[in-house]
Image (cartoon, rainbow, N blue to C red):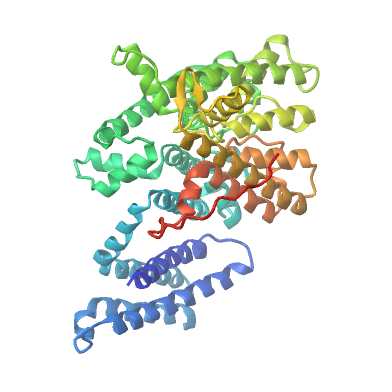
């Protein structure tokens, strides 16, 4: 039965892909062949589904009478399929037939909705897999929509690889682009990118559950477990309040940021819809740490604009310190709690250290280089802004193609670290770095327990921190190896691009659009892995713990 349900889902997905790819007007010779292969695969899956359904039927005598609706839909699909592929009729009938045919696929899926719902419900028992699949689904839908003609200025839609890259970059709130968002996409295309950013920043599952809560629907214990996993919160009794707080905080910050940016854009664009649209877009992009901009030079033209720099920087910092930290700070200000949590203190202190260090490193390395022609005020402002964007935002006010190798190397370290856990940012997270530093300090002081600010850190958290570090370094090493073979570009540019993608930063040395197909696929995978995070990816890949436990004799290895 599980295989049958998988066949139904695969048929639906292929039907949607066939419809979008067939209507995307992609000027490539492989498209008709790909559509034909998909269509014949759909036909084979439908026939196979009915054969398996009949074989699994315990009482076969009344099978046809009991399954008349589903069999009728299969028959209609076959007729439409034959008409679309064998008929010589042209004109506008082809499009209508394809649309009607794929609607019948959807209708057929709904005839099995009850059986499918029980199958889908089993996914919630493995939260990591659910989150992974939800991101994949949103990326796929975004890719298919961006391939539509109405999304691009040239009325041809993006190619499949460009659409997949753009959708992944938006959902994974990275900001790397292979087409110029400002000039290549229509307003509709830009709005779709903005929606993908918002969904990716908050998470599709979080938004879905908030909708259920807003409608007064009950949420099962399995879904509450999923939410608890997503939010890293053990107390499920306060999940509803936590989700509502996250949505309210997001709306308040993005709304406030849009108002402030609107006032900053008015002198340049006037009191207009354009100024308001640009303000809303960049406020959401900044808070979600996405880095998408509606200016071809990102924010380079605003390098001397103190208001724009500080507003965008504040939005990025707030998005990167996490909702838990903001909620704890709010409760402390209002007197609901007597002290800040260890996580809040670590996030704020490490963030401040990284921002200050990044500012002085960039200024020290480039004040006589890329920023040589800037005024002293612009140099410090630009250095601070770029230090902030290294926290996985992706905007830039300095051209990134002429930095010194030392600057690229230092920036890669900051991008790899990222921001706080539970935020809209990426990287291995500042909490992980704090635990690693605490462990090294404990070893150097010959202490058995790892402590941070006079609080003990569990062995499980230490192991988790090292696991995240090893996973990140391993993934990047593999990416460096593939990119160095597939791209004929300086290694420092390739390495910078890879780290930027894994850290979901979005900063680029200007090579993204010149990457080969293999290079773009590698960057897509890095953005996806970086957004989900090492723990989610590893948890999704692991199987359930076996009930058989075997104790092996202890071995000794020479290390160091």
When asked about the image quadrant of residue 233, the answer is top left
Q: Is residue 410 left or right of residue 126?
A: right
Vertical placement of residue 393 versus 57, above or below: above
Question: Can you name the residue that lies furthest to the top here?
Answer: 376
Residue located 62% across and 16% down the image: 356
Q: Residue 262: x percent and y percent? A: 47, 21
Along the viewing direction, whichever of 463 and 290 lies nearer the viewer: 463
Q: Residue 209: x percent and y percent? A: 30, 42
Vertical placement of residue 548 versus 408, above or below: below
When asked about the image quadrant of residue 254, the answer is top left
Q: Is residue 533 left or right of residue 411?
A: left
Name the quarter where the N terminus is drawn.
bottom left
**Looking at the image, how many numbered discs can be counted on the residues?**
0
Name the quarter where the C terminus is drawn.
top right
Q: Is residue 277 left or right of residue 368?
A: left
Q: Residue 389: x percent and y percent? A: 59, 27
Along the viewing direction, whichever of 52 and 215 lies nearer the viewer: 52
Residue located 73% across and 31% down the image: 409
């Amino acid at each position: 039965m599980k295989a049958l349900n998988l066949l139904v889902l695969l048929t639906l997905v292929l039907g949607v892909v066939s419809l979008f790819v067939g209507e995307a007007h992609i000027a490539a010779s492989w498209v008709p062949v790909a559509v034909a292969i998909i269509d014949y695969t759909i036909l084979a899956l439908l026939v196979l589904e009915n054969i398996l359904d009949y074989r699994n039927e315990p009482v076969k005598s009344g099978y046809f009478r009991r399954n008349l609706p589903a069999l009728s839909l299969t028959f209609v699909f076959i007729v439409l399929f034959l008409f679309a592929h064998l008929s010589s009729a042209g004109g506008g009938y082809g499009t209508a037939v394809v649309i009607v045919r794929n609607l019948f696929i959807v209708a057929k899926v709904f005839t099995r909705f009850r059986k499918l719902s029980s199958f889908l419900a089993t996914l919630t028992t493995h939260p990591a897999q659910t989150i992974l699949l939800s991101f994949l689904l949103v990326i796929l839908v975004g890719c298919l929509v961006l391939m539509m003609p109405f999304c691009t200025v040239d009325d041809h839609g993006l190619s499949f690889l460009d659409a997949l890259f753009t959708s992944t970059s938006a959902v994974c709130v990275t900001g790397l682009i292979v087409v110029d968002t400002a000039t290549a996409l229509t307003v509709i295309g830009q709005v779709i990118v903005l929606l993908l950013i918002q969904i990716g920043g908050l998470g599709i599952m979080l938004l879905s559950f908030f909708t259920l809560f807003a409608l007064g629907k009950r949420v099962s214990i399995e879904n509450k477990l999923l939410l608890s996993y997503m939010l890293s919160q053990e107390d499920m009794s306060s999940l509803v309040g936590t989700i509502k707080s996250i949505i309210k905080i997001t709306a308040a910050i993005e709304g406030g940021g849009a108002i402030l940016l609107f006032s900053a854009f008015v002198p340049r664009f006037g009191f207009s819809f354009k100024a308001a649209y640009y303000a809303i877009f960049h406020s959401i992009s900044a808070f979600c740490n996405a880095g998408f901009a509606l200016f071809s030079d990102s924010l380079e033209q605003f390098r001397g604009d103190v208001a724009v720099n500080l507003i965008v920087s504040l939005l990025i910092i707030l998005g990167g310190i996490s909702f838990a930290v903001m909620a704890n700070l709010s409760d402390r200000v209002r007197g609901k709690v007597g002290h800040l949590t260890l996580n809040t203190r670590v996030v704020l202190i490490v963030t401040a250290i990284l921002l200050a260090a990044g500012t002085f490193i960039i200024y020290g390395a480039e004040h006589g280089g890329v920023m040589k022609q800037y005024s002293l005020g612009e140099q410090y402002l630009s250095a601070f802004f770029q230090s902030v964007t290294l926290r996985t935002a992706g905007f830039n006010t300095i051209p990134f193609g002429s930095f010194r190798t030392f600057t690229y190397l230092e920036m890669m370290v900051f991008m790899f670290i990222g921001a706080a856990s539970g935020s809209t940012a990426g990287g291995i997270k500042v909490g992980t770095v704090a635990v690693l530093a605490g462990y090294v300090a404990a070893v150097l002081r010959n202490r058995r327990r790892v402590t941070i600010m006079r609080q003990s850190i569990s062995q499980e958290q230490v192991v988790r921190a090292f696991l995240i570090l090893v996973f990140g370094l391993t993934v990047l090493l593999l990416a460096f190896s593939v990119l160095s073979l597939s791209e004929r570009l300086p290694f420092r540019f390739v390495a910078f691009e890879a780290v930027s993608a894994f850290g979901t930063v979005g900063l680029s040395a200007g090579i993204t659009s010149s990457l080969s197909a293999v290079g773009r696929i590698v960057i897509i995978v890095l953005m996806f892995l970086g957004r989900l995070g090492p723990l989610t990816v590893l948890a999704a890949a692991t199987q359930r713990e076996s009930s058989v436990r075997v104790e092996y004799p202890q071995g000794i290895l020479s290390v160091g």
